[in-house]
């Protein structure tokens, strides 16, 4: 993690961002993991955009390997309590203020943590879904993640993960030896495999969700990207399309991004601190 910037430098970056957004009536906002690290949720990539840890499990591995299915749910069982109790930070709240000023066409987030909604944002498109829901891959039954946590606890009485550490997206690093003893969940109706209601690597963003985000992009005057390296194509394509349409694009992020060559304004700083200084009194 880079050291914090001096307050005067953060204030200067916030002024630059506010000056830029004040030029436009409606802004398309895309957020990534960098806005939620201030809420205690780890991210995947370093400031160079490289993986800091092994990449997330793919959909194909999740459904095709019972060992990986068991490992995913064992780690998720441990990681969910911290993830689900994380609170919105100043950056989430600042974007909610910006939305209330009718300055945002939509807030597209690559995160699955619902922190934007809990901060008060209403026009949120969860590009990669939400981790607070689950779906059966057999019958389609949908349930709340909290309900599944209770079931897993009842089916794993006495199970212990040994050493555990928080990881991105509700995951946790646990002792591999503990995984083998974990009883993974299955659908209470049909016995099918259960999946968090999120887009895994190897899956596509649902077409209706993509169309909704694209409509918001077309309705905007400019694009603001916050806390994302854009290394995942599902987010990067919006920056690329905006550039091809001649729309102004700004990025606030710590470190380089895949779209640095496409933007009009690149700002480096703490997302929460800069957004709060730029928009909390918008």
Image (tube, grey):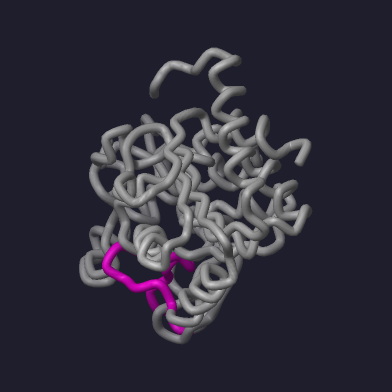
Q: Which residue shows up at 49% across the image and 38% down it?
A: 41
Q: Is residue 238 above or below residue 55?
A: below
Residue at the far bottom: name it: 139
Is 132 placed left or right of 234 in the picture? right
**175 to the left or right of 112:** left
Tell me if residue 133 comes above or below residue 116 in the rendering: below
Which segment did they paint magenta?
190-206
Residue 118 image point, x, y percent: 70, 51
Considering the whole magenta stretch, tell me its main secondary structure.
loop
State the image coordinates of residue 47 (x, y, percent, origin top left).
32, 32
Tell me if residue 142 can be seen: yes
Q: Residue at x 63, y 64 (%)?
A: 105
**Quick one: 82 or 162, which is closer to the camera?**
82
- Which image quadrant: the N terminus? top left
Q: Name the side, left or right, on which 181 lies relative to 250.
A: left
Is residue 191 located in the magenta-colored stretch of the structure?
A: yes
* Image position of 239 (left or right of 175): right
Residue 149, x across and y down, in percent: 55, 56
Give 167 or 270, whichever is nearer the viewer: 270
User: Is 98 inside the magenta-drawn segment?
Assistant: no
- Asked whether 71 or 44 is in front, the reply is 44
Viewer can see residue 151:
no
Along the viewing direction, whichever of 3 and 199 lies nearer the viewer: 3
> From the image, which quarter does the C terminus lie in?
top right
Q: Where's residue 236, x and y in %? A: 35, 58
Identified at 29% across, 37% down, the residue is 175
Above-or-below relation of 186 to 97: below
Residue under the point 47% across and 46% down: 250
């Amino acid at each position: 993690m880079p050291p914090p910037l001096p307050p005067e430098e953060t204030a200067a970056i916030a002024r630059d961002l506010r000056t830029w957004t004040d030029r436009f009536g409606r802004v398309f906002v895309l957020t990534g993991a960098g806005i939620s690290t201030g809420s205690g949720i780890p991210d995947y990539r370093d400031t160079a955009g490289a993986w800091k840890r092994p990449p997330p499990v793919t959909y194909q591995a999740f459904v095709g390997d019972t060992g990986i299915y068991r490992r995913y749910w064992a780690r998720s069982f441990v990681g969910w309590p911290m993830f689900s109790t994380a609170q919105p930070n100043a950056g989430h709240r600042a974007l909610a203020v910006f939305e209330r000023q009718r300055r945002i066409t939509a807030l597209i987030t690559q995160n699955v943590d619902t922190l934007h909604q809990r901060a008060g944002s209403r026009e949120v498109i969860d590009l990669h879904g939400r981790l607070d829901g689950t779906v059966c891959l057999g019958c389609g039954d949908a349930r709340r993640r909290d309900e599944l946590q209770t079931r897993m606890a009842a089916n794993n009485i006495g199970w212990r993960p040994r050493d555990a550490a928080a990881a991105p997206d509700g995951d946790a690093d646990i002792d591999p030896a503990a995984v083998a003893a974990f009883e993974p969940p299955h659908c209470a109706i049909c016995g099918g495999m259960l999946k968090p209601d999120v887009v895994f690597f190897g899956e596509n963003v649902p077409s209706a969700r993509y169309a909704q985000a694209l409509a918001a992009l077309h309705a905007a005057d400019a694009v603001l990207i916050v806390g994302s390296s854009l290394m995942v194509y599902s987010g990067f394509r919006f920056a690329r399309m905006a550039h091809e349409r001649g729309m102004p694009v700004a990025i606030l992020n710590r470190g380089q991004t895949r779209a640095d060559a496409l933007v009009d304004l690149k700002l480096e700083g703490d997302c929460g601190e800069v957004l709060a200084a730029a928009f909390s009194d918008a």
